[in-house]
């Protein structure tokens, strides 16, 4: 049976990447969508692990060929999720985690109607700014831009399926894990397995 998509979005600095990494370590049979980006890698990032680092020219060629389920330009860099990365994993039976913004989530939902959307919020704007500064990867101009963007992004949580407030990281990961486990237990996903195990049919 094909897997499903679980999209996790949040303002930059709210902790979504840490939550995704926690889920990947805890949950069996879970895949992860590695995005393409036109930007250069940061110090600790690796090709094919954090992103597929693609030059802008190649990225534009992929756009033109319809390779992306979603793509966007963020802070002058291009980011995209390819159909092949998603479909290859789902067709093998894996559920797939996506760490993308709300704009991308909407486009993914257009292409994959059963995708489950989870939004992660910081406990406050002050806590968000503190996390961005502690991260140490952005200068003052970028931090200001991220804070301004976050103020507008947060309202997107209203059209997501689930909302997590990340005031405690362990609790936030546990809540995200509970969402995935409960989705896997839904009748629609379990009936096919039951049919195969017990060799029965349902009316």
Image (spheres, rainbow, N blue to C red):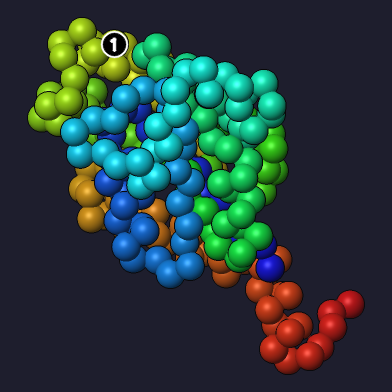
Using residue 4 as the reference point, say whether residue 100 is left or right of it. Answer: left
Q: Residue furthest top?
A: 141
Quarter placement of the C terminus: bottom right
Mark 1 surroundings within 10 Å by alpha-carbon count, few (fewer than 14), some (14 through 19), many (20 or more):
few
**In the picture, residue 64 is in which quadrant?**
top right
**How many marks overall?**
1
- The residue sitting at 19% across, 20% down in the picture is 138
Residue 89, how many percent across, how many down?
57, 57
Kindly identify the residue that appears in the image at 47 percent across and 18 percent down. Answer: 56
Q: Position of residue 26 (x, y in %)?
A: 34, 65
Picture quarter with the N terminus: bottom right
Q: Is residue 119 visible?
A: no
Q: Is residue 86 above or below residue 10?
A: below
Residue 30 in sight: yes
Residue at 35% in and 27% down: 11
Q: From this viewpoint, which residue is outermost toward the right?
A: 203
Residue furthest bottom as drawn: 198
67 vs 23: above or below: above
Tell me where residue 202 sits by quadrant.
bottom right
Query: Element at badge 1?
Result: helix
**x, y percentage for residue 167?**
22, 42
Residue ID for mark 1: 145
Residue 125, percent from left and from top: 23, 23
Q: Nearer the viewer, residue 3 or 58?
A: 58
């Amino acid at each position: 049976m094909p897997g499903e998509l679980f999209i996790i979005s949040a303002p930059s600095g709210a902790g979504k990447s840490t939550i995704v990494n926690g889920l990947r370590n805890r949950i069996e049979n879970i895949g992860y969508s590695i995005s393409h980006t036109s930007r250069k890698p940061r110090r600790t990032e690796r090709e094919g692990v954090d992103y597929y680092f693609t030059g802008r020219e190649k990225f534009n060629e992929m756009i033109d060929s319809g390779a992306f389920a979603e793509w966007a330009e963020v802070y002058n860099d291009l980011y995209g999720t390819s159909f092949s990365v998603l479909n290859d994993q789902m067709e093998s039976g894996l559920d797939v985690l996506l760490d993308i913004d709300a704009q991308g989530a909407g486009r993914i939902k257009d292409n994959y109607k059963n995708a489950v959307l989870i939004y992660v919020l910081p406990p406050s704007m002050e806590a968000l700014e503190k996390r961005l500064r502690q991260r140490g990867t952005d200068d003052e101009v970028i931090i200001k831009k991220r804070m301004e963007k976050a103020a507008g992004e947060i309202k997107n949580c209203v059209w997501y399926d689930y909302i997590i407030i990340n005031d405690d990281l362990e609790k936030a990961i546990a809540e995200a894990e509970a969402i995935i486990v409960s989705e896997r237990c839904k009748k629609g996903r379990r009936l096919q397995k039951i049919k195969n195990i017990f060799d029965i049919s349902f009316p």
